[in-house]
């Protein structure tokens, strides 16, 4: 690549840098993409770059692979319904320990090692929740246990950090009115948080290349998805498992005032930068 080619890349990014300066982006990072140490560093370096050019970034993390390993070590089996982990008391203790004591601090350490300023924000100080109602798929099979859905969000701590140019790193744990902790699906938590912050963008970085028209064909990514499209894909059984809470929370976020929602494959190097700063973009964009 010649110096002129490098200059063209910067010039293509310029209007996006100008447009999004001082905007708020909520980035949800999770899935198998978090299991590759080098890829995690590349992704978090992209987050630091976004903050460096004046974009306020809130990072809310999952921790599925790390939680799965910890549960296995503890001899606790995992069950999912429509992408939601059934959470009993023992499972909740492991989830809270891994998210708040391991994954969150590790992300903060990497961000700061890359020159950013970051601080962990425990979700139980942000999300007030109620027990999530059982899904139709769970009918007659029990309950989801300690799985919550946000009813209100206290964003003061996050706003204060953003004002100081610090990247908040938020865990998807909530607290009920009775003080009980609840596991929140990270996709749902991210959508609710983005809506409360009126974020310009909500970006899901995961291990799937957006929404696929054919789940068996990784090249069948749908570039733009509307609520009508979502309904059709659900009826056809295309949207299922972990993609369901992503898409449903994305639409809720848009209705709450979020500018745009993007579903990107976090395994693609610099997917976040390609989506934000180039004309073509990658993954799936959801619009109303």
Image (cartoon, grey):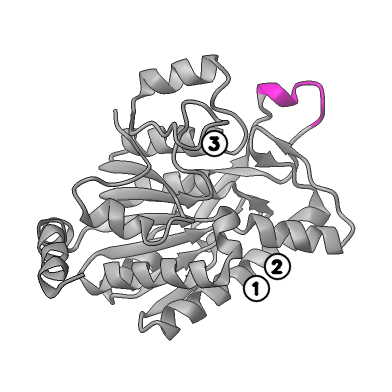
What segment is highlighted magenta in the picture? 136-142
Q: Which residue is mark 2?
A: 97
Identify the residue shown where x is 43% and y is 70%.
42
Whole-angstrom CA distance, mark 2 to mark 1, is 5 Å
Q: Nearer the viewer, mark 1 or mark 3?
A: 3
Q: Is residue 141 magenta?
A: yes
Q: Secondary structure at mark 1?
A: helix
Q: Give yes or no for contact between labels 2 and 1 (Cβ–Cβ under 8 Å).
A: yes
Residue at mark 1: 101
Give how far across and how far down residue 264 sits, in percent.
41, 47
Residue at figure coordinates x 59%, y 29% from the top left: 240
89 lies above or below 22: above
The residues tagged by marks 3 and 2 sit, at their Cα atoms, a distance apart of: 25 Å
Which mark is drawn over residue 243?
3
Between marks 3 and 2 in the image, the one whose residue lies nearer the viewer:
3
Image quadrant for the C terminus? top left
């Amino acid at each position: 690549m010649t110096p002129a080619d490098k200059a063209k890349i910067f010039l293509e990014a310029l209007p996006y840098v100008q447009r999004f300066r001082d905007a708020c982006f909520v980035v949800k990072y999770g899935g198998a993409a978090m299991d590759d140490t080098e890829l995690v560093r590349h992704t978090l370096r992209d987050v630091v770059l976004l903050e460096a050019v004046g974009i306020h970034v809130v990072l809310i993390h999952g921790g599925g692979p790390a939680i799965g390993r910890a549960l296995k070590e503890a001899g606790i089996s995992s069950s999912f319904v429509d992408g939601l982990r059934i959470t009993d008391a023992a499972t909740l203790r492991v989830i809270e320990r891994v998210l708040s004591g391991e994954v969150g601090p590790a992300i903060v350490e990497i961000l700061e090692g890359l020159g950013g300023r970051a601080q962990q924000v425990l979700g139980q100080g942000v999300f007030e929740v109620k027990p999530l109602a059982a899904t139709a798929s769970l009918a007659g099979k029990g309950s989801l246990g300690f799985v919550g859905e946000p009813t209100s969000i206290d964003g003061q701590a996050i706003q204060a950090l953003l004002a100081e140019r610090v990247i908040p790193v938020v865990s998807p744990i909530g607290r009920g009115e009775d003080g009980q902790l609840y596991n929140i699906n990270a996709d749902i938590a991210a959508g609710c948080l983005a809506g409360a912050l009126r974020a310009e963008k909500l970006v899901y970085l995961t291990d799937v290349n957006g929404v696929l028209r054919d789940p068996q064909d990784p090249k069948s990514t749908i570039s733009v998805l509307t609520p009508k499209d979502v309904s059709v894909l659900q009826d056809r059984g295309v949207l299922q498992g972990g993609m369901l809470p992503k898409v449903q929370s994305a639409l809720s976020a848009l209705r709450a005032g979020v500018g745009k929602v993007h579903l990107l494959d976090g395994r693609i190097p610099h997917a976040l930068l390609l989506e934000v700063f180039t004309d073509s973009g990658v993954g799936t964009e959801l619009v109303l």
